[in-house]
Image: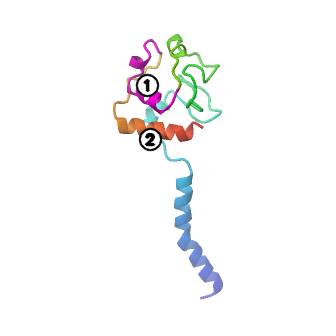
């Protein structure tokens, strides 16, 4: 076997390791719950608002204030909520119960495992 053949064989042998590392380092696939959210929201910087606002940089932001060009309900704007893992979890359980009079037409996500997966993913994607 030539040196070139050995080097080529070695490269093919370690390629899957680097490929797996690259996939881990890249953003993770969206959780299933995001399929419902994306009908009304976007999350990447620069993406347009839809029926709901773009959620980029939502963590640490005051509810009803993150997108100045989006028309939020007066109830949400005056809620005093600052978005973090806990407030998003409560919101996702039942938005209408958390802020009476908000306009988000979403019944909620009962499964705590799905909510956690969504919030964790959002934390990474919404930077």
Nearest the viewer among 14 and 80 is 80
Badge 2 density bin: few <14, some 14–19, many ≥20, Cα 10 Å = some
Q: Which residues are magenta?
A: 83-102
Q: Is residue 95 magenta?
A: yes
**Could you say where residue 109 lies in the image, as x and y percent from the top left?**
37, 30
- Residue in front for this viewpoint, 13 or 122: 122
Q: Earlier in the sequence, mark 1 or mark 2?
A: 2
Element at label 2: loop
Disc 1 target residue: 91
**Residue toward you, 79 or 37:** 79
Residue 118, relative to residue 25: is it above or below? above
**Taking 113 as reference, is 43 left or right?**
right
Q: Is residue 42 above or below residue 96?
A: below
Disc nearest the viewer among 1 and 2: 1
Q: Position of residue 77 (x, y in %)?
A: 55, 15
Asked if residue 16 lies in the magenta stretch, the reply is no
Q: Which residue extends farthest bottom?
A: 1
Residue 11 found in image quarter: bottom right
Name the residue located 57 percent from the left edge and 29 percent from the top edge: 60
Give the quarter of the figure containing the C terminus: top right
Specify how the rendered protein is coloured.
rainbow
- Residue 31, numbered label: 2
Q: CA distance from mark 1 to mark 2?
A: 17 Å
* Residue displayed at 49% across by 41% down: 121
- Residue at image coords 64%, 85%: 3
Does 121 appear above or below 72? below
Q: Quadrant of residue 46?
A: top right
């Amino acid at each position: 076997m030539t040196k070139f053949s050995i080097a080529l064989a070695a490269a093919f042998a370690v390629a899957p390791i680097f490929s797996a590392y690259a996939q881990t380092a890249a953003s993770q696939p969206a959780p299933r719950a995001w399929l419902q959210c994306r009908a009304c929201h976007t999350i990447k910087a620069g993406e347009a608002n839809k029926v709901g606002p773009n959620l980029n940089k939502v963590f640490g932001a005051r509810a009803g204030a993150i997108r100045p060009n989006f028309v939020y309900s007066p109830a949400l704007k005056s809620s005093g909520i600052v978005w973090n893992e806990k407030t998003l979890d409560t919101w996702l359980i039942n938005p209408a119960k958390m802020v009476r009079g908000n306009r988000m037409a979403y019944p909620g996500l009962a499964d705590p495992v799905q909510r956690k997966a969504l919030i964790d993913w959002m934390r990474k994607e919404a930077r």
